[in-house]
Image: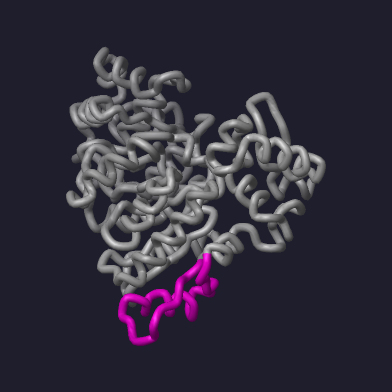
Amino acid sequence: MMEELLADPEVIAAMRRLRGDGPADIAEVIARVAWSVVAEPGDGVAGALITELGAAEAMRFAFGGAARSAPAQPGGRALKEALARWRPRAAPRAVREAMSGADEVGASLLLPGDAGWPAAVDDLGPHAPSLLWVRGDAGLLTATPRVAIVGARAASGYGELLASEFAGDLAATGAVIVSGGAYGIDGAAHRAALSVQGATVAFLAGGVDRAYPQGHRQLLHRIAERGAVVSEVPCGAAPTKWRFLSRNRLIAALSDATVVVEAGWRSGSLNTAGHAAALGRPLGAVPGPVTSATSAGCHRLLREYDARCVTTTAEIRELWAGDQHAPAGEQGADPDQLRLLDALSTRTGLPAQEIARRSGLAPDTVSALLGLLELDGVVQRGDTGWRRVSARERLG
């Protein structure tokens, strides 16, 4: 399979268009696309093979070629069952279609090791994605802070109102709103972020070329234009129940904190919350009336998952900027400082003009605050601009 794909000039040309200026290890890129076709999201056996052998060698091992070395892990029954479920999908034509589909909608291909790869998802270990398909601004995946706002599809007016208020306030001050593009709470959060010219990321269970739900076609188009629409399954892939659940782990892993605004007792949002808790990510839940079925899941999170009760935007900020983790310059800081810090990334430097745009502060105010925060060791100026100094760097 690998040799056939590597010998196909159309595949090579499509790969180069998708990668743009990114690193071009042709075999590795094509192999990762092939893995996204043959393996379901979060497949731990595929992840272990790729980690041990590399994507190209793992593909050769799995599909009849001679890998340079046999894997030590995984083995036995798990590997045998995995090979049986992968092989029916091992069609070079499907890989070509995945690439051409992405090319048609202007999607980009993001791989581990790329400068813009969101390292936060690597915390998923063997269940981490082997690649991400992105329509829109891939840089938002590494911008900080990123907060997931999720909840019930059949949301009440109370839930949608709070989701809109929280997402709008957070996005207006530089936070990236992450959600799943669904009806209800997800849609309210995305729309609110867009309404204040803020940043938002929608993770889909199907390909980035397929609007789901159909009623959010226009919303997802706007997110792709002004934010980012992301998936780990290739273009053309249909959303399925399993893929929705698997998609939730990416929302939780990418986000610095997850807030469940409204959820029923068995809501899929509890799955996202469970992933956040398992990864050690801060988790918040919004309380509702004790008689409301749409808040029963939130109350369950407060009782069983050790979620923090959040009722205001300030309390949501405390999830990722609590006293024990907050920069020295942030504790007791004025609102303008908080807005500026929220607009900064710990990884990528930003010019002062871009910081002003993201924070909504005047350029002169930004320049003055950056000078003060630099003296406190909270921000640092580099070749590409200003960035926020991480807690790990401050602690040495």
Could you tell me which residue is drawn at 56 percent across and 45 percent down?
144
Q: Does the magenta stretch include residue 236?
A: no
Could you tell me which residue is drawn at 28 percent across and 44 percent down?
220
Q: Is residue 292 magenta?
A: yes
Q: Which of 44 and 164 is in front in this view?
A: 164
User: Taking 310 as reference, is 209 above or below it?
Assistant: above
User: Taking 376 as reference, is 164 above or below it?
Assistant: below
- Of the 4 image quadrants, the one containing the N terminus is top left
Q: Nearer the viewer, residue 365 or 104?
A: 365
- Residue 318's quadrant in the figure? bottom right
| Left or right placement of residue 221 versus residue 56 in this view | left
Could you tell me which residue is drawn at 43 percent across and 49 percent down?
127
| Left or right placement of residue 171 versus residue 56 in this view | right
Spot occupied by residue 221 in the image (x, y as percentages of width and height): 27, 40
Range of residues picked out in magenta: 284-312
Spot occupied by residue 140 in the image (x, y as percentages of width and height): 47, 39
Spot occupied by residue 33 in the image (x, y as percentages of width and height): 33, 32
Can residue 262 be seen in this snapshot? yes
Colour approach in the figure: one colour
Could you tell me which residue is drawn at 23 percent across and 26 percent down?
104
Can residue 124 be seen in this snapshot? no
Spot occupied by residue 38 in the image (x, y as percentages of width and height): 27, 39
